[in-house]
Amino acid sequence: MPEKLSHWLMKSEPDTFSIDDLARRPKQIEPWNGVRNYQVRNMFRDQMKRGDLSFFYHSSCPEPGIYGVMKIISNAYPDPTQFDPKSDYYDAGSKQEEPRWLLVDVQFVQKLDKPVLLNTLREHEARLSGLRILEKGTRLSVTPVQPAHWKYICKLAGI
DNA sequence: GCCAACGTTGGC
DNA sequence: GCCAACGTTGGC
């Protein structure tokens, strides 16, 4: 029996990496590197699986919100940037034999014709109660999305 | 193991 | 640029 898919929301600052950047990548694939948070690392490791779907959320920008959909196309594996002294994400404390940080590969699925902005999500709080992004102080760059919330947001997005 | 100080995130 | 909220660090 096929394992059930999970749904996610992954944030990125569009100045750093946007949904359009993902769409322009070769094969529209990108390693989601640079995550340096243990909770997210554990979600990558324990919960996220190849085949899962994720919203692409733009944060720290004039109109924060969901701008697209992508697919998780790998299970978690060590993030090579942690071993690269030239990388912003270099972690001198991480050992090759015992990598501290993981990543997954993602692939572009679609860009939304009209983004579902954070404002809009808030307007639908009643139907989206429990959505992590709406909870005060949630700074995790990756959060799970319940199937019912996923469906509802897709409806808001017109997909 | 506690907790103060510091750094980061991210909306506004 | 402000600042609330949270995570991490490090002295004890």
Image (cartoon, coloured by chain):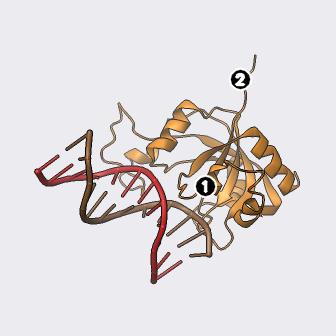
Chain colours: A orange, B brown, C red
In the rendered image, which quarter is residue A19 located in? bottom right
Assign the N terminus of chain A to one quadrant of the image.
Answer: top right
Residue A49 seen in the figure: yes
Question: Foreground mark, 2 or 1?
Answer: 1
Residue A131: % across, % down: 67, 49
Circle 2 sits on which residue? A3
Marks 2 and 1, the one that precedes in the sequence: 2
Q: Which residue is mark 1?
A: A135
Vertical position of residue A50 compared to residue A153: above or below = above
Q: Are marks 2 and 1 on the same chain?
A: yes
Can see residue A78?
Answer: no
Q: Amino acid at mark 2?
A: Glu
Residue at left 35%, top 48%? A91
Mark 1 residue element:
loop
Residue in the picture at 67% in, 66% down: A64
**Relative vertical location of residue A112 with respect to residue A36 in this rendering, above or below:** below
Give residue A29's position: percent from left, percent from top. Answer: 67, 46
Q: Chain of mark 1?
A: A
- At label 1, the amino acid type is Glu
Which circle marks residue A21 in the picture?
none
Q: Kindly identify which chain the residue marked by label 2 belongs to.
A: A
Q: CA distance from mark 2 to mark 1?
A: 29 Å
Q: Secondary structure at mark 2?
A: loop
At horizontal 48% and vertical 42% (from top left) the residue drawn is A39
Q: Residue furthest right?
A: A158
Q: Badge 1 local density, few (<14 within 10 Å), some, or many (20+)?
A: few
Q: Is residue A15 above or below residue A39?
A: below
Q: Where residue B7 sits: x, y (%)?
A: 35, 63
Neighbourhood count class around disc 2 (C-alpha, 10 Å): few under 14, some 14–19, many 20 upward: few
